[in-house]
Structures are given as C-alpha cells and as structure tokens.
Image: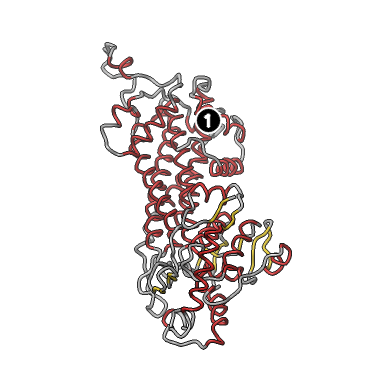
Amino acid sequence: MVKIGLGALTLADIEKTVFKTEKVDLSEEAKTVINDSYTFLSEFSKNKVIYGINTGFGPMAQYKISEEEQKDLQYNLIRSHASGLGNILDPVYVKASMLARLNTLSLGYSGVNISAVQVLVDLLNNHVSPVIFEHGGVGASGDLVQLAHLALVMIGEGEVVYNNQRRPTSEVFAELGITPMSIKLREGLAVMNGTSVMTGIGIINAIYAQRAIEWSVGISAMICEMVDSYDDYFSAELNSTKKHSGQQYIAKLMREGMADSKYIRKREKQLYNTHIEEEIISNKVQEYYSLRCVPQILGAIYETIIEAQKLLVEEINSANDNPIVDAKNGNVFHGGNFHGDYVSFEMDKLKIATTKLSMLAERQLNFLMNPQLNGILSPFVNLGKLGFNFGMQGVQFTATSTTAENQMLSNPMYVHSIPNNNDNQDIVSMGANAALCAKKVIENTFEVLAIEVISIVQALDYLKKTEGLSAQSKKIYDSIREIVPEFSGDYPIYNDLRKVKEFMMENSSWKV
C-alpha cells in the first residue's frame, strides 16, 4: 500500500503504483489537512471575491457569479473544457497523471471536499482509466483540457477504459460502487488547474528513458566483448580525468558488467609490451567513437534522465493549483503555480538526450551491418547464404528512418508559446505537447534498441562467441533468444521486433 501523505511521494512509490498495481490510501495526516483546508475556505470565501468560486474564469474573471449559480459554474467549467481530440492516452500515463493530481490535492492547498480525493483513490485502486485525449493542453493554466476529461469522469460523466473496454463512466461507477465527486466550492477548477497530466506523462517518460539507457549500457558492453575491445575506454583511470559524475558512473557500470568477460583485452599486453614490426598494424589500435566514447555520450544522457526524474518528483509533490488556499496562515493567494515551464523544459531536454541515445544505437547498428567497418561479420549479420538471404538488411532501414524521426521531433516545444484565451494566457508552456513529443521519441528509441539487440545476438552466434561472455551480457543474450531464436532464413520479423521492444520497455537489463 502506497500512503499518500504531505508531499512525500517518491519515484519508487510512483513505479509501484503505476507498474506494480500497488494500491494507494490517504494518510490520516492528509485527510486532516484536506478537511481543514476545505473548512477554512468555506468560511473564508463568504463575502469575498475569490477567483473561481464566485467569479468567472480566465478573461471572464471580472464577472461576479451569484451564490445559487456557483455549483453549476463548476459543472459548466468541466463540461465546456472536456474538448480534447487525437489519440487516447494509454492507461499507464493516465494512472500516473491521476496519482499526480491526487497527491497535489492531498497537500491541503486546494480547498476541495474530500470526495474529490476519494474518487481518485477509487479510480486508481480499481484500475479505471479515464478517457483523456492527447490534444488540448497548452500548459499555462496547467493541463486544462486533459484534466477536464479527468474531472468529467470524477463527476460520473464521460468515458473510461476498464478491463480494456471503453465504456460510459456511469456504468462502471455503478458496477464498482464508486461515488462521484461532490461539487461544493471549487472542485472543478481545483482538479483542472494544474500540471498533473504533463507531469504524469513526464514521469513515465523518465522511467522508460532510464530503462533505455540501461539497455544501451548493456548492449554497448556486448559489442565491446564481441570485438575483443581494450579495457581502457571504460577504465577508472581514464574516466576519472574528467569530472562528470555521469561519465564516471557509466564507465563504472561497464567495468563491473564486463569484469568476468573472457573477451576484453588489456592494451598493455597487446600493444605496449609487444614489439610490432608491421607497417600497417592489423591489431586495431582504437575503436570507432560509437564504442570508444560510450561513457562520455551515455554519461551526459544519464545525468539528464536523473535530473528529469528529480524535477518531476518535485512537481508531483508541489501545489500547482490557483488560487492557493493557505489554511495555516488564513489566506488565499492568487498566482501561477499551474504554469508548466519546469516540466516542459525538462521534457525537451529529456527527448534531446534520448534522441542522442537512439543515434548512438543506430551508429552501433551500422557498425554491425557493415563488414568494412567491423571486419569480422558477414554483411548485415547474415547467417544464411550471401546473396540469397538478407539477414538484418531490411530492419536497418527501419532503425535509420526511426532515428531520423527522432532527430526531427527533438526540436524544442518549450519555446513554441502561442497566446490564446483572449490573450489572458499570453505566454504558455506547451508542457503536455512537450511530454508527448518526448514520449514518442522514447518509444522510437526502444524500436532502434530492439533492432540493435537482435542484431547483436545474431552476430554473437555468427562468431560463436557466447560462452566467454560476461554474466551480464549472457543474461541479455539469453533473454532475447527466448523471444527470437537464431535464424538464417528470411522471414517477416515485424512481430518479433514488437515483442522485443515491449520486453525491453517492461524490463531493466542493467540497473542504473
């Protein structure tokens, strides 16, 4: 059970809730502050002008709303803004978004009735996924449109995905005995004003990106073993001369992972303590950059992923509503905590880093495909008859085109602000768009990694170099071979590519 306390949600809690179906529950402390905040706002809001309780919204905030219309105001806001289009968000991203919204509402800065929080607990624990569309949010008053679809479900309307079926919310609520959210003061605005969808997508992106770099480290080590690499590329002595912690950490992982390999060579034994009379040295002096510079490349990517995770966990544990209800100091503060700049900027950085990871994978793949480069493999790692069979020739096209798409998608979204809402929202974050672009880049990267890892296991079989592999590399080899047996004939490989991609996204190969 993951307890929702006061801003104490960790990355491990998020992973357990989203990926391991751990149930959530409110701590007694959280229940107390939620109730205290609601009670305070109920009294404080009387005879005062407070945005979103007795006023219109956005550029219509100057319009006073009568007491008898205030509940309907909240319903109108929810229903009018449930206007998303495009693809439906996958339940894993919706679940993370709901967890993010639950956590921020539980901080006691939103003044909501506890029913708003309880319905989110019920949705999470019953694995009910509100239908939320990808298109709609500009990330200024938060994810208004996407969160409106969440709020629509919370009041018992709209649609949900339950047991892989898209159904009316009212039917599923009746079936499961879920009570909709009660509208009391500002529950509609409180649910909709915030960064929870961009943050929910973002935190899943950051988790998947970490898995991608784990695979990249493991795959890079396998290629090093395949080519009998020298060990100084990832040595402590070399990498400690640069001060970047990410580089040093990736090098350390590679050293530890290949420590028991029978294929890694010592340079001093091969080139320093041997008299070489050849004019052209057949024993390669240095590898291509896609192998020699792995700690430097992946180190920068690793640090970017870790920073993204840190920032996104901070956002999930933050109050991103407006106005902020401060029961402790007896006041209500109007501001812009719903603005998504932190998340948007971080998503752009994350997708750029992940695109570079896919570029590294694509270049390593090209090395495997071209015998003029590797000098030890058949063209396209072909285990069949040259000229008659094609090996991995076809899939290289897929990897190249997918990497090219990543490069195009890596243009920043953060700087693409477009004023809207009668220019009330005159500068926006485009946070949800940034998170969705990063999501696409990360999914693409796993496609490239899947193609690369299949090529590597084929190459190892071609070279008959599996027995001397490190335990870590052998583990990866065995896991991929369980999905894709060794093949020499040609066959439509697309289903196996999909299976390997899904396996890689769901599992970590190398703990970073």
Q: Position of residue 138 (x, y in %)?
A: 43, 68
* In-image side of 241 versus 366 (left or right): left
Tell which of 150 and 331 is nearer to you: 331
- For label 1, the crowd category at 10 Å Cα-Cα, with few meaning under 14, some 14 to 19 and many 20 or more, is many
Q: Secondary structure at mark 1?
A: helix
Q: Position of residue 404 (x, y in %)?
A: 42, 49
- Which residue has dot 1 on it? 457
Q: Position of residue 425 (x, y in %)?
A: 38, 74
Residue type highlighted by circle 1: Val
Above or below residue 51? Residue 37 is above
Above or below residue 434? Residue 277 is above
Above or below residue 227? Residue 157 is below
Tell which of 245 and 54 is nearer to you: 54
Q: Residue at x 64, y 67 (%)?
A: 159
Q: Position of residue 118 (x, y in %)?
A: 60, 64
Quadrant of the frame with the C terminus: top left
Q: Residue at x 48, y 62 (%)?
A: 107
Tell which of 288 and 162 is nearer to you: 162
* In-image side of 186 versus 234 (left or right): right
Tell which of 8 and 422 is nearer to you: 8
Q: Tell me where residue 63 sits by quadrant.
A: bottom left
